[in-house]
Amino acid sequence: MPDPRYPDTEPYTQGVVEVGDGQRVFWEISGSTGGKPVVILHGGPGSGSSPGHRRWFNPSVYRIVQFDQRGCGRSTPPVSDPATSLTNNTTQHLIADIEKLREHLGIDRWLVCGASWGVTLGLAYAERYPERVSELVFLSVTMTRRSDVHWLYHEAGRFFPDEWAKFRDGVPESERDGDLVAAYNRLLNEQPDPAVRATAARHWCDWEDAVLSLEEGWKPNPRFAQPEFRMTFARLCAHYFSHAAWLEEGRLLRDAERLAGIPGVLIHGRFDVGGPPDVPWLLAQAWPDAELHLVRTGHAGGDEMLTEVIAATDRFADTVS
C-alpha cells in the first residue's frame, strides 16, 4: 500500500507563549499561512509534538499548529529536571494553555486532532470550549478513566506476564499488590534519590514498549533510550495517570452532549491491547455526531489507520471554520 500521508513540510513560524506559573509553551506552525486552522495534541503525556503528525493534513489547505505540552519537548521548564515541580501541570492547566495559544495566534475556531493521550485532552478541551471547535479527529482513543489506567498497567499484563512481572517488581515489595501507577508516581515524583528515579523511569518505559510489541513492524521506541526523554515521559505519565487526569470518573462520556453539532471522526485499532475498542465505542454512543472506524491495527496504528485519518482531514478541509 502506498504511503497515504502528505509530504513533510517545515514550520514557517514558531514561538513561545507565556502561560503563567513560570511555564513557557513552545509552538510552531506549518502548512498554509491562510489555511484552515488545526491544532494537533500529542500523546504521552510527555511525548512532545512530532513532525510526522503534520503529514496527516494537506499543507496547501491547512494552517497546522503544533505545540509541546507543559514541561516536555521544547517547552520549559523541562520535566526531565527533577527540580521542576509538577504542581502546575494538570489537565486543567493544559486546557487553559490551548485556549491561551488560540487567542495568542488570533484563531477563532479550529479543528482539534488528538492521538492517544491527546484524545483525552482534546475531549476535555472541546467539552469546555465547544464554540471554539469546528471538528474533531481522534485516533487511538483514550479517556483516562481510572478503569482505563488500571487496565493498561495491571490487566494488560495478562498478555505479557514476564514483562509485567518486571514492571511490578520495579516498585517496593510492600506496594506490589496495590496500585502500581501510584507507586511509580511516588518513585518518580517524590523519591529524592536520582538513581531510584532513573531506574523507575526505565521500568516504566520498558512496560510502555512491551504493550506495543505485538504490533506489526514494532521496534523498541528509540526515544526511550534517551535518559532525558525517558524521565520526562515517565514522570508525566505517572503524574497524570495516578490522578486519572484530574477528571471525574466518566465525566468525558457524561459531558459528550456538549459536543452536539461538532462533526467528529474516531479511529481506533481493534487490536489495541492497551486501549480496548469498547472505549471509542462508548464515546460514539454518547456523541451522535461522531463516526467510529475500527481498523485492523493496534495502538500505534499503521497504513489502515492513517488512510482513515487522512480521509477525515481531507473531508473536513472543505468546510468553513
Image (cartoon, helix red, strand yellow):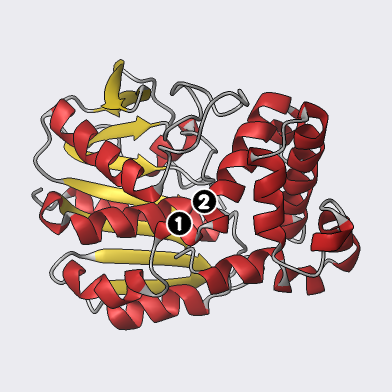
In 3D space, how far apart are the residues under numbered discs 2 and 1 (Cα atoms)?
Answer: 5 Å
As drawn, the residue found furthest toward the bottom would be: 285
Secondary structure of the residue carrying tag 2 is helix
Give the residue pinned by disc 1. 245
Reply above or below: 296 against 86.
below
As drawn, the residue found furthest toward the right would be: 162
> At 50% from the left edge and 46% from the top edge, which residue is drawn?
43
Viewer can see residue 215: no
Horizontal side, residue 58 vs residue 80: left or right = left
Horizontal side, residue 176 vs residue 211: left or right = right
Q: Position of residue 214 (x, y in %)?
A: 76, 61
Depth order, front residue of 257/57: 257
Q: Quadrant of residue 202?
A: top right
Viewer can see residue 125: yes
Residue type at mark 2? Tyr
Give the residue pinned by disc 2. 240
